[in-house]
């Protein structure tokens, strides 16, 4: 993927320049260029001859305008024929068979490929596709020229006519001479060339676009010179010696499939030259170019000119490159001494495409007219429309559809089409076909249901043919396939206007609303009424209508009639009695006519018959202030904004919204609104309501994410009330509803530099890395950390720095503080361990301040806070190449692999081991290495040394044992030296220390197809079988034979083969050789001798070449080398059946004899006749034949033809005249064909063409009885009706139907019949037959739905058999075939109510539930049970019942009986043990009787037998927030915590207690509470009560007394009410009743030292005392003051300070700021004026920060902020004193 050049140049830096411009020579060892095995030299086709296609689209041009979307035809067959030269289309004759065939795809496109030069006809044969019948269409003769057959240039790779370039090599020194020049003529914009002389004598040269040879690439050798010429295209990189397999960016050489191969124009003046073309794709590895394909060709001898056009198909390349994702292309030329040649054009070519479309265009000119029977109907009248469709040709129109949907307001009545059918639901008239000159009509009638003009439109929406002057379904009224007619009923148009005389009144004032109603006609409006009900807050005063009257009770203004153009008014006066906006609406609520644009009384404010007006009297004055806790924070520090909203009244403000969207660069952290909610995405604080003279606050915390001033603006953007001095959301900065504050963060610009003392160490040597961090300000940088992790293979030795500490384990250098303009350095010593290129990177990973041009720790190499150095140790670059002497051996042959190990250096490789494990299918024969030894057992080749830039080889011979593709892989297993781009033995194919070679045994894929010209011959006919054999390659098939044995019953006649010969004795077709992509055909003629199905099978019986998917002669039908075809001679098999519709009819009844003929033969029977002579005792009535005709005089049914599988029928109706049995005989008496199992007219009764049927008239006396099991059931309770039918004979009865239709309000449940079935929908019991003396019963289970008496009747309504004493279905109750019974159901109506005595109890209180059950009849109720289970959290106390008993365990009140109109009561007492909302339900769960409107125990809360009571314990949702004014205070500063408790309701909170006990490190100073008291000893703030939406606040002021961070936590520990989302005093951090803040004081660890230059001076001497002060951090020390008093006996001379000022009078050294890690010095010079020992002290007197181990100014001698030095001035003792001692 990437480039190895960078790595190699860093290893050795071996590139050098020579020559002019970009010409350079480079040692071969410094290049990384892939090596490929040399393929066998082969001559490719000189030029393509079949790169021509014919392509086009098959479509149905329905509109004659060419191809449109949706007209494409998929699946159409298209053929191409080669013309025999006479220009006439002669398929099957002079033009033979198609040379190519294709099927159109989903877009209708076909493509006929691989055509050579010649003349062609393209044919669309007649066919039917998806219901479309396509006629044959043939193109004119299309000519493909020889030039077109050569293809077209799709992409130019190089035309060599741009930039001129030349390189030459005269020395055989292993150094390539190269050039890279930008050239627009080259693909990728640059052409890379190099030459390498390999001969002893002469020179080699390559030139491009030489003035003497313009547009030519020339490769030359002189004076016996020989070598390598190379051209590559890999994008613009200026490097000709390293190939970049991503350089071209993934070029698609196929150009989306339009290009098929390379075209190369080349030639030489001598034979022996070879050109290798390589194509590369990205292999995903920046160090390798292993994904490639290549092909080799012999350069022809053209005398030296580029006149040979070479076509190289992409398919000819071998390798893994993706030709659609090409990153580089290479042309590599080698030759013989003194060869010279040229190349003119390199490019990618594709086939020439000739277009031929097939449009399948037809026309039919349809037109449509429409008329109506009336133009001005009235509502309710019937209107009719007549539609006529006419076709003026020239073709018949088919598939015609017309859309005529009646408009809204006309209700469909009927439709009468002259043809086709009309669907009133869709409005589609399916017309069908209309011949040329014909007309079809449709009449549609409907009822006018509403007023308003109605246009009825009809349009032709579909037709199979193109209409020359219109388009179906396009909705264009100007076309003649669309027509409309409009009817116009009477209409009115009422509109209403409303105004008010004062829209902003004061409370108590009167306002007058004026209503104006207008009628715009066109008709008079009658019965007009307007409703204007005053809204709440307005009281009626008076009304004055211009007509009609007004009722103040309902606000109804009865207007009456209003003429067209007329107007009426109403003045309505009302008084304003409350504040707030009041909208007064009026609307027309009645009118006698339809309104054209509105509907009376529909309350639609968008209509003009409704109007509203509003009045708003209120005012509220809102103002806003905003502050920030810090205006100069660090980036990533939080800023706290406090926004205060005030309402100065006079009214409460509602709907208040404030926008405060944090500016860019400040990220939202949290928000604490005192009321309402805050949306951080929109910045919207939805305040809601704020009372008059009230304040609300929003505390908004944001994190600073970027530098630069940031202005945060807050503004009131919405309020329901008018503000007297500002307008919400207008952005006016001068108004008091807007406030802003600006913060400006700090920055420090850090940069990092890194060096190494030795860039080329030996392995094991130490190197020293030096890191320098610089701060370019503008602010000091604190908390600086640098990451420098040593690379793998390096061992840390030591480190030293100017400041801070380096941790070798983590690689982190904690630098600390760097002042503006300051620097810090670090030196790291480490031992080099890995050979090759090593890179050591460092990066600044942390800083408290924002860096304006880099981000710590983001690993972005381009930023100035990162740095890298590299060094290089010894390395080798081994690569493998592998070739095979033949890529397509036969099975059993030996192949020879050649393995080459190359070392591209830069160092020699030793003890190299290469493994070559042969794959399964190859057997080892021998191995011959040029150096080292080969172990035949391990397959390892051991090589002592591979010199730098040298190579060794080995040949390995193996035998091929498998017919497949075999891949042999070789890999370097080991070497003493590391490899620059691969790891020995890791089995990574993409590395260059692994190579493969593949072989493929020869294969030929034979397939066979077989057809027959006639699948249904007559016996004795000849048929022709056609066998086609095809070879799909990839190799030619030899020794091919096909076996085709004729089936039994057929005789061989002749055979004709296009290839080979056919032996009729053995039935073997000896085909011989079938070339790749070729085939052969055999035709066998045979005679059919017998009937029955005959299957003829052919299969490939022999082939010398392996077939990949079949085995010759194995007789497996699933394989494609075997095919069968079957034929069936014609046969018929006629059979006759005969039946009668009533075998036992009554005398005088008609019966129907049914005859059916079936033909189960294989063919149609003709000349069929049946004889059916009627018996004595019946009289012929009629005959109906489905085929042919029946002659009642002769009894002959002349049927005619009976198709295979068809069944013609004959029905003969006769009247039964006598009671005796009558036999009717029918027989097939004629047919033209042979019947397989019978002979027509032979009178044999056992044959299936003979049938008889008998009839015998019967009589049966039927009677019926009916009973019910319970005449008085409950409503809804099941009863069983029993119906009994008895047959008293003398014969069986058939076809018995009994009707028992249940009466109204009786619901069917089930039916059980002893015989037959019962249909509950029709009430018919289909009993069927009943024998003499037989009985049948039917039990119907049903239930009554109300208490009304119901009569259920049953009657025999039908019987096939005559009844002597009754007539079925005559509804005669006196007859014994009819009976009835009655039922009277019972029903009750129970209802239940439940109440509670307290709906807001406290926990622990009792509540009393009262349940009352009532029976509203109409029947008495018994077995009543009511269930009332107490909910969870309730404890049962007692129950008092008026009747029955209550079970506290089950919750069941067994009530018992309740008479109609009576009630019963239960009082249930329970204790509340829970909080929240508690629902207690009760339900009637049992009763013996059905309830009219409810179901016991179904838990349906909407029914009146279900009741519930609810109570809600008070809930107060408390939340607590805590903030600190300064989280990083100085030592002298107090820390102020603000704790806010808010009650989010919904109820008031009482007994609120908050615990906030200061942690160690903080000393309590004071507290301020808005309510309640705070005890600093216990940390308890007894807040007391907080109302709903109320807030309580406390501030605690504390003093820092520790350097350690202190976390202060506040939590609500008590409240009387239930909090829904938190539990007081549970210590859970995630709950909203707890909050913490951490205070981290600024800490500076100061220490001092003191030293004197002369501790024992003489009197009068000057001494210099040196004092130092150091800051060990972790923070910068500010306002540092040190005390250095001049001791007595010394006189101050001078002070030299490194920073600050010294006041000798006070002894104070005012130092100022001391950053972390720095030391400052003062040198004080004093004169010794007195004898004695004098201490000279220094102490830190004061500093802003806390010192962790000392206290400024406390004079503690043991603390490190105090130091002292003793100065002793010796006494000058007198001799006297000395002697006296």
Image (cartoon, grey):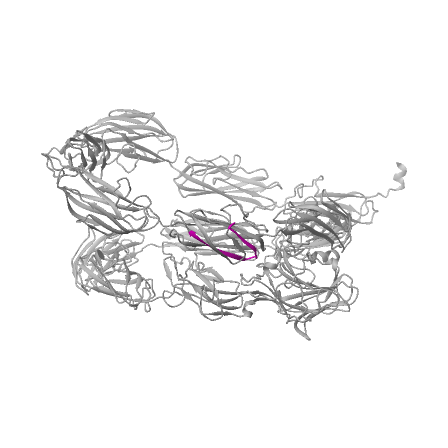
Q: Indicate the position of residue 318 as horizontal and vertical percent values.
A: 62, 56
Q: Which residues are magenta?
A: 1065-1087
The reply to whether residue 1461 is visible in this rendering is no
Q: Indicate the position of residue 1674 as horizontal and vertical percent values.
A: 65, 46
Q: Nearer the viewer, residue 173 or 1535?
A: 173
Q: Indicate the position of residue 385 as horizontal and vertical percent values.
A: 21, 62
Secondary structure mostly taken by the magenta-highlighted segment of the chain: strand
Magenta highlight on residue 1074? yes
Q: On screen, 1325 above or below 555?
A: above
The reply to whether residue 1253 is visible in this rendering is yes
Q: On screen, 826 above or below 565?
A: above
Q: On screen, 469 above or below 1221?
A: below
Which quadrant is the N terminus positioned in?
bottom right
Q: Nearer the viewer, residue 190 or 1761?
A: 190
Which quadrant is the C terminus positioned in?
top right
Magenta highlight on residue 1682? no
Q: Nearer the viewer, residue 1744 or 1639?
A: 1639
Q: Indicate the position of residue 100 as horizontal and vertical percent values.
A: 49, 61
Q: Nearer the viewer, residue 1393 or 1697?
A: 1393
Q: Residue furthest bottom?
A: 212
């Amino acid at each position: 993927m990437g480039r190895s050049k960078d790595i190699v140049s860093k290893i050795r830096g071996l590139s050098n320049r020579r020559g002019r411009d970009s010409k350079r020579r480079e040692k071969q060892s410094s290049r990384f260029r892939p090596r490929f095995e040399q393929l066998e030299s082969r001559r490719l086709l000189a030029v393509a001859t079949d790169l021509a296609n014919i392509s086009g689209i098959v479509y149905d041009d329905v509109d004659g305008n060419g191809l449109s979307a949706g007209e494409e035809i998929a699946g159409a067959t298209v053929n191409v024929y080669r013309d025999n030269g006479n220009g006439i289309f002669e398929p099957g004759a002079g033009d033979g068979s198609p040379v190519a065939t294709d099927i159109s795809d989903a877009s209708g496109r076909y493509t006929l490929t691989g055509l050579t030069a010649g003349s062609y006809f393209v044919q669309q044969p007649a066919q039917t596709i998806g219901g479309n019948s396509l006629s044959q269409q043939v193109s004119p003769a299309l000519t493909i020229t020889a030039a077109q057959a050569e293809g077209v240039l799709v992409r130019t790779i190089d035309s060599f006519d741009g930039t001129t370039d030349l390189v030459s090599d005269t020395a055989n020194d292993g150094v390539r001479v190269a050039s890279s020049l930008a050239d627009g003529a080259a693909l990728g914009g640059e052409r890379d060339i190099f030459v390498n002389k390999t001969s002893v004598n002469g020179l080699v040269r390559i030139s491009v676009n030489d003035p003497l040879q313009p547009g030519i690439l020339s490769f030359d050798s002189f004076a016996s010179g020989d070598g390598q010429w190379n051209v590559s295209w890999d994008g613009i990189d200026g490097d000709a010696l390293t190939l970049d397999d991503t350089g071209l960016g993934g070029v698609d050489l196929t150009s989306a499939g339009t290009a098929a191969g390379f075209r190369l124009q080349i030639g030489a003046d001598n034979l022996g030259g070879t050109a290798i073309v390589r194509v590369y794709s990205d292999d995903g590895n920046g160090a390798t170019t292993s994904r490639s394909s290549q092909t080799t060709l012999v350069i022809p001898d053209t005398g030296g000119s580029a006149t040979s056009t070479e076509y190289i198909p992409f398919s000819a390349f071998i390798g893994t490159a993706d030709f659609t994702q090409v990153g580089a292309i290479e042309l590599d030329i080698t030759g013989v001494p003194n060869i010279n040649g040229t190349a003119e054009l390199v490019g990618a070519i594709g086939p020439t495409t000739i277009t031929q479309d097939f449009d399948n265009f037809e026309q039919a000119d349809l037109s449509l007219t429409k008329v109506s029977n009336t133009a001005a109907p009235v509502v309710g009248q019937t209107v009719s429309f007549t539609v006529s469709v006419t076709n003026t040709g020239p073709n018949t129109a088919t598939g015609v559809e017309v859309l005529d949907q009646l408009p809204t307001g006309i209700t469909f009545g009927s439709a009468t089409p002259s043809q086709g059918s009309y669907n009133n639901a869709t409005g589609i008239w399916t017309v069908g076909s209309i011949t040329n000159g014909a007309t079809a009509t449709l009449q549609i009638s409907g009822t006018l249901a509403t007023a308003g003009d109605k246009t009825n439109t009809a349009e032709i929406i579909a037709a199979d043919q193109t209409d020359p002057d219109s388009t179906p379904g396009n909705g264009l009224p100007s076309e003649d396939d669309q027509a409309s007619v409009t009817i116009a009923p009477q209409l009115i148009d009422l509109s209403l206007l409303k105004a008010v005389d004062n829209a902003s009144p004061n409370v108590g004032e009167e306002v007058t609303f004026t209503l104006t109603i207008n009628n715009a006609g066109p008709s008079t409006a009658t019965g007009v009424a307007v409703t204007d009900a005053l809204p709440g807050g307005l009281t009626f005063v008076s009304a004055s209508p211009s007509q009609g009257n007004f009722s103040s009770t309902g606000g109804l203004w009865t207007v009456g009639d209003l003429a067209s153009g007329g107007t009426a008014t109403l003045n309505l006066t009302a008084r304003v009695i409350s504040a707030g906006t009041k909208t007064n609406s009026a609307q027309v609520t009645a009118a006698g006519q339809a309104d054209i644009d509105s509907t009376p009384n529909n309350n639609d404010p968008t209509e003009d018959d409704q109007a509203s007006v509003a009045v708003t009297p209120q005012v509220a004055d809102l103002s806003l202030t905003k502050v920030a806790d810090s205006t100069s924070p660090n980036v990533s520090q939080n800023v706290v904004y406090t926004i205060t909203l005030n309402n100065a009244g006079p009214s409460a403000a509602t709907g208040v919204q404030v926008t405060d969207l944090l500016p860019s660069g400040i990220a939202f952290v949290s928000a604490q609104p005192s009321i309402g909610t805050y949306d951080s995405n929109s910045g919207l604080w939805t305040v809601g309501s704020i009372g008059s003279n009230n304040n609300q606050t929003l505390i908004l915390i944001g994190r600073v994410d970027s530098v630069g001033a940031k202005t945060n603006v807050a503004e009131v953007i919405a309020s329901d009330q008018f503000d007297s001095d500002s307008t919400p959301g207008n952005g006016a900065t001068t108004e008091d509803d807007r406030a802003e504050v600006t913060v400006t963060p700090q920055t420090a610009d850090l940069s990092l530099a890194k060096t190494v003392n030795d860039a080329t160490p030996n392995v094991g040597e130490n190197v020293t890395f030096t890191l320098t961090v610089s701060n370019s300000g503008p602010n000091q940088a604190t908390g600086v950390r640098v990451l420098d992790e040593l690379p793998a293979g390096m061992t840390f030795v030591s480190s030293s720095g100017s400041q801070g500490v380096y941790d070798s384990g983590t690689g982190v250098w904690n630098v600390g503080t760097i002042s503006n303009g300051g620097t810090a350095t670090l030196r790291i010593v480490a031992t080099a361990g890995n050979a090759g290129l090593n890179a050591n990177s460092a990066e600044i990973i942390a800083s408290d301040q924002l860096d304006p041009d880099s981000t710590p720790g983001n690993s972005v190499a381009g930023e100035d806070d990162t740095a890298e150095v590299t060094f290089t140790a010894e390395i080798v670059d081994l690569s493998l190449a592998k070739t095979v002497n033949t890529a397509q051996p036969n099975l059993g042959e030996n192949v020879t692999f050649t393995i080459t190990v190359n070392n591209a250096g830069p160092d020699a490789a030793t003890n190299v081991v290469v493994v070559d494990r042969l794959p399964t299918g190859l057997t080892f024969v021998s191995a011959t290495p040029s150096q080292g030894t080969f172990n035949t057992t391990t397959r390892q080749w051991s090589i002592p040394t591979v010199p730098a830039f040298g190579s060794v080889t080995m040949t390995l011979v193996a035998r091929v044992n498998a017919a497949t593709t075999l891949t042999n892989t070789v890999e370097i297993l080991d070497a003493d030296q590391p490899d620059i781009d691969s790891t020995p033995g890791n089995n990574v194919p993409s590395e260059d220390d692994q190579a493969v070679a593949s072989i493929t045994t020869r294969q030929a894929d034979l397939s066979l197809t077989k057809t027959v010209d006639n699948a249904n011959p007559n016996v004795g006919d000849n048929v022709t079988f056609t066998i086609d054999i095809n070879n799909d390659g990839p190799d030619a098939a030899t020794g091919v034979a096909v076996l085709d044995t004729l089936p039994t019953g057929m005789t061989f006649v002749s055979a004709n083969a296009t290839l080979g010969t056919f032996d009729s004795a053995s039935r073997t077709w000896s085909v011989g050789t079938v070339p790749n992509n070729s085939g052969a055909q055999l035709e066998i003629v045979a005679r059919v001798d017998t009937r029955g199905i005959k299957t003829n099978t052919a299969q490939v019986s022999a082939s010398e070449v392996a077939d990949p998917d079949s085995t010759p002669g194995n007789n497996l039908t699933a394989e494609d080398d075997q095919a069968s075809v079957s034929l069936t001679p014609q046969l018929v098999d006629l059979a006759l059946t005969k039946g009668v519709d009533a075998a036992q009819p009554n005398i005088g009844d008609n019966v129907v004899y049914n005859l059916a003929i079936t033909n189960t033969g294989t063919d149609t029977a003709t000349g069929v006749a049946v004889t059916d002579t009627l018996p004595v005792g019946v009289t012929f009535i009629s005959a109906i034949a489905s085929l042919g005709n029946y002659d009642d005089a002769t009894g002959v049914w002349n049927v005619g033809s009976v198709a295979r599988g068809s069944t013609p029928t004959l029905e003969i109706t006769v009247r039964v005249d006598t009671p005796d049995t009558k036999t009717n005989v029918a027989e097939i008496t004629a047919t033209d064909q042979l019947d397989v199992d019978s002979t027509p007219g032979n009178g044999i009764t056992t044959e299936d063409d003979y049938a008889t049927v008998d009839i015998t008239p019967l009589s049966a006396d039927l009677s019926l009885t009916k009973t019910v099991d319970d005449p008085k059931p409950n409503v809804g309770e099941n009863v069983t009706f029993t119906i009994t039918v008895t047959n008293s004979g003398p014969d069986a009865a058939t076809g018995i139907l009994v009707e028992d239709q249940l009466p109204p309000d009786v619901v069917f449940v089930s039916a059980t019949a002893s015989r037959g079935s019962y249909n509950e929908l029709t009430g018919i019991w289909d009993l069927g037959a009943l024998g003499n003396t037989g009985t049948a019963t039917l039990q119907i289970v049903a239930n009554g739905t109300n208490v009304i008496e119901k009569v259920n009747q049953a009657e025999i309504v039908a019987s096939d058999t005559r009844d002597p004493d009754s007539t079925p279905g005559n509804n005669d109750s006196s007859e014994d075939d009819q009976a009835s019974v009655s039922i009277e159901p019972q029903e009750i109506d129970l209802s239940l109510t439940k109440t509670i005595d307290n709906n807001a109890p406290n926990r622990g209180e009792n509540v009393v539930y009262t349940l009352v059950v009532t029976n509203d009849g109409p029947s008495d109720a018994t077995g009543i049970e009511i269930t009332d289970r107490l909910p969870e959290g309730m404890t049962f106390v007692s129950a008092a019942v008026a009747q029955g008993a209550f079970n506290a365990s089950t919750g069941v009140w067994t009530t018992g009986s309740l008479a109609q109109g009576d009630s019963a009561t239960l009082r249930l007492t329970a204790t509340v043990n829970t909080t929240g909302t508690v629902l207690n339900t009760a339900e009637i769960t049992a009763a013996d009787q059905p309830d009219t409107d409810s179901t016991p125990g179904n838990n349906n809360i909407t029914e009146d037998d279900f009741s519930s009571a609810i109570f809600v314990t008070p809930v107060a949702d408390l939340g607590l927030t805590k903030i600190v004014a300064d989280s990083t205070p100085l030592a002298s500063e107090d820390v102020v915590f603000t704790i806010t408790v808010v009650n989010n309701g919904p109820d008031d909170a009482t007994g609120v207690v908050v615990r906030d006990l200061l942690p160690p490190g903080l000393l309590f100073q004071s507290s301020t509470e808005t309510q309640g008291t705070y005890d600093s000893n216990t940390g308890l703030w007894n807040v007391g009560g907080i109302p709903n939406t109320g807030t309580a606040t406390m501030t605690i002021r504390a003093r820092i007394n520790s350097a350690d961070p202190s976390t202060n936590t506040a939590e609500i520990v008590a409240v009387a009410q239930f909090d829904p989302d938190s539990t007081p005093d549970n210590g859970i951090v995630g709950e909203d009743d707890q909050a913490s803040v951490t205070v981290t004081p600024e800490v500076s660890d100061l220490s001092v030292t003191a030293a004197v230059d002369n501790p024992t001076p003489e009197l009068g001497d000057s001494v210099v005392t040196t004092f130092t002060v150091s800051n060990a951090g972790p923070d910068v020390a500010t306002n540092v003051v040190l005390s250095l008093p001049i001791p007595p006996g010394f006189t101050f001379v001078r002070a030299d300070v490194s920073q600050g000022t010294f006041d000798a009078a006070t002894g104070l050294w005012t130092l100022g700021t001391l950053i972390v890690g720095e030391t400052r010095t003062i040198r004080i010079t004093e004169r010794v004026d007195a004898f004695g020992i004098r201490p000279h002290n220094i102490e830190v007197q004061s500093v802003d920060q806390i010192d962790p181990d000392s206290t400024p100014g406390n004079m503690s001698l043991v603390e490190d902020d105090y130091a002292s030095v003793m100065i002793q001035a010796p006494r000058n003792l007198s001799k006297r004193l000395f002697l006296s001692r």
